[in-house]
Image: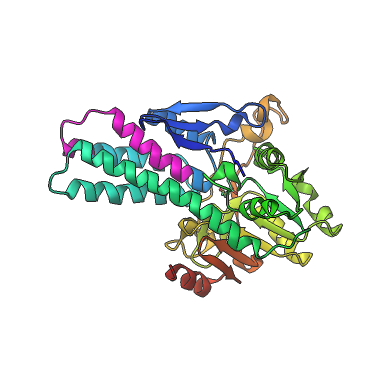
Amino acid sequence: MNTILPVTLNDDASKLILLDQTELPAIEKFLEIDTREDLYEAIKKLRVRGAPAIGVAAAYGLLVCMKKETYASIAEMQKDFSALKSYLASSRPTAVNLFWALNRMEVRFVSECEKKASSPESILKGLLEESLSIFTEDQAMSMAIGKHGLALFEKHMGIMTHCNAGGLATTGYGTALAPIYLGYELGYDFKVYSNESRPLLQGSRLTAYELNKAGIDVTILCDSMASLVMKQGKIDAVIVGADRIAANGDTANKIGTSGVAILAKEYGIPFYVAAPTSTFDLKTAIGDDIEIEVRDGEEVINGFGRRTGPEGVKVYNPAFDVTASKYITAIITERGIIFHPDRESVSNHLKNK
Ligand code: MRU
């Protein structure tokens, strides 16, 4: 299956290439980025979005921005690395893969600096290798999640998803959509119901776009339709991605996800979360401790060029919510499946490589 690659590097690794997801589904436009300001803006404005894709973009972007500079000494390079890392880390607060990728690049940076014959060139070479590993591991992660996840689905299921956790949110088959793509390749005839995911409509602009393009049966729902459609018996399972998973399995994902999980429990429908182990944040004990990004209210009342609320009115626009682990039937990672996630099962899963 050919999914669209939302994040890549150009041939000489001097530019980060991003599919501008704010233009989808109307236009497939690619951006060439080589400045820290443009990278920050692209993450902040969701030109690149979805936790794993943000991580890959940050790693590649950090490399590209550093390659552009001329450093007189390694000390100067170290100073700039710290400044650049802090700047990029301040672009979005919730998706932990951003911090995970930046920290991984930092570990590599420090180890390259400590090598005897290190030079700006050798350090950049190390950063290139590390970012390429993050990219290829992301692709492998997607495939492994798809394989583990598919075991939970049967051939003719109706599946609900929320937001976009597909190819556009990773560099492979996605997380939540990976089992769907793999099943489709094996002849499963899933019917996917994609909640549009107000206010930025990742469910209709992105999920429906990529599934439709792949030939998979997908129906868009307004978020408010989830209960009715579940009651009508159209949904056999729900699967979503994650932006951060606390040590006890509580999961932050796109605003609206927790409501879908509570409804699924009420209707006796399994609710699955699919995410790589890099999305777990063991330093965060419980979901309530996860920082929730609050975005500009204009996205709610003046989205996509149409004013739908009075100017100057108060708007509250949290971008994520937290689903308590008691509503999650299982979390699927690249290592396998955590049934009934809680502190103990999460910890055991992450210990097992
Ligand atoms: O604000 P976004 O579009 O970055 O939010 C993305 C989501 O909530 C996804 O469901 C999540 O990152 C999982 S992506 C594989």
**Which segment is the magenta one?**
54-77
**Residue 25 seen by the camera:** yes
Q: Residue at x 71, y 42 (%)?
A: 196
Asked if 280 appears above or below 90 in the picture, the reply is below
Magenta segment includes 73: yes
Where residue 268 sits, quadrant-wise, is bottom right
Seen from the viewer's position, the closer of residues 140 and 239 is 140
Seen from the viewer's position, the closer of residues 277 and 180 is 180
Asked if 284 appears above or below 88 in the picture, the reply is below
Q: Residue at x 49, y 27 (%)?
A: 31
Asked if 83 appears above or below 249 in the picture, the reply is above
Q: Where's residue 335, x and y in %? A: 50, 64
Q: Where's residue 235, x and y in %? A: 78, 57
In the displayed structure, does residue 231 sit left or right of residue 55?
right
Number of numbered callouts drawn = 0
Quarter of the image where the C terminus is located: bottom left
